[in-house]
Image (cartoon, rainbow, N blue to C red):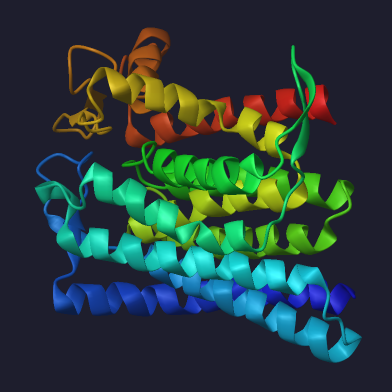
Amino acid sequence: MEFITLLPIIVSFFVTFFFIPLWIKKARARGFLWKDMNKYESKENVAASGGIVVVLSFVLGILIYIGVKSFLTESQDFTIISMFALLTVILILTIIGVIDDLWGWTTGGMSKKWRLILALFASIPIIVINVGESTMNLPFFGVVHFGIFYPLFLIPLGIVGATTTYNFLAGFNGLETSQGILILTFLSFVAYITGSAWLSVVGMTMVASLIAFYIFNKYPAKVFPGDSLTWSVGALIAIMAILGNFEKIATFVFIPYFIETALKSRGKLEKQSFGKPNKDNSLELKYNKIYGLTHLSIYILKKIKPSKKVYEKDVVYLINVFQLLIILIAFVIFL
C-alpha cells in the first residue's frame, strides 16, 4: 500500500522536473514567450504555459495509481470512477486553458462569458456521477438537505467558482504555484484524516508536480504556468472538497480568493494584478486604488519596510504567509 501511495507522487514530480526544461527550450525555439510584467523594460523572454506539463504529469501519476490499484488489489470500487471523472474535468479545463493562453491575455483572451460557460461544461463529469454529501450543517440554518439541488447546482457552482477565481490571484513569479502547494497540501491532509486516503494521494500527486514546477517558476521565473495550470488547480481544490465532503474547510481556506474577487470587482475584473516596476525592479502601485491582494501587499510592505523598497518576492511571500495563517485558523476551527 505504501508503494501504491508513493509511486504516483514520485512519478509526477520527476516527470515534471525532467520535461519542464525541455518545454522551456522548445518554447524559446518556437517563440512561445511572454513578458515578465513586474520587471523593468521586460522583453518576451519567459516560456509560456508550462502548466500543461504539470497537469499531464499529474494525470500520468493518477493513471499509474489507478492501474496499480486495479491490478494489485483488484479493486473496482467507486473511487476509481471518481478519479476518472476528476481527470476528465481537469483535462477539459487544461484544453480550455491552453486555448486561452494561445489567444493571449494581452489581447483579452477568452471572454468572461465563455470562460464561465466552458467551466460549467467541464464540471459535468462530476455532476453525472452524483458524488458528495447533499446534507450539510450550516451556521444559523442547522442541518440542511439539498437533495437534487446539490449535484445540479452547488457542484457546478463550486467548480466554476474555484476555477475562475483561482486565476485572479496571479501574475507574480511563483505565486500561483506556491498557493496551489499550500492549499492542496492542507486539503490532502484533511482528506487523509477524514478517511479519504485515496483523495489525499490525488492531492499530493498534484503537489509533487507543482513543487517540481516551482523550481523553474520561482523568482526569477524561467517559465510561466498559464491558465492551463490555474484553471486545473482551482478545479482540483473544488473537486477534492466535493469528493471528500469537506466543502466548509475548503471554502474557508479560499478566503484570500474571495478577497481578491471582491477587490477585482472594484475594477470590473479588468484591472491587472501587476505592480509598476522601477529601474531596480522594485515595485510601485500600478493604480491609485487597490484592485487585488498583490496591490494591497505592495501597499502594506511599503508602509512597514524601512527601505520602502518592495520587490516581487516580497509580495509573494506576504500573500503566502497570509494563506498559511488562514490554513492555521482553519485547522484550529475545523479539526
Image spot of residue 175 (x, y percent) = 43, 42
Vertical placement of residue 235 versus 77, above or below = above
Which of the 4 image quadrants contains residue 44?
Answer: bottom left
Which of the 4 image quadrants contains residue 168?
Answer: top left
- What residue is drawn where x is 72% and y is 53%? 243
- What residue is drawn where x is 83% and y is 56%? 196
Q: Quadrant of the C terminus?
A: top right
Image spot of residue 75 (x, y percent) = 86, 81
**Residue at the bottom extreme, as displayed:** 71
Instruction: Answer whether residue 314 is visible to the viewer in this image.
Output: yes
Vertical placement of residue 224 versus 39, above or below = below
Q: Is residue 335 left or right of residue 295?
A: right
- In depth, the one of 73 and 211 nearer the eye is 73
Image spot of residue 298 (x, y percent) = 34, 21
- What residue is drawn where x is 82% and y is 81%? 76
Vertical placement of residue 70 versus 170, above or below = below
Which of the 4 image quadrants contains residue 187?
Answer: top right
- In depth, the one of 62 and 155 nearer the eye is 155
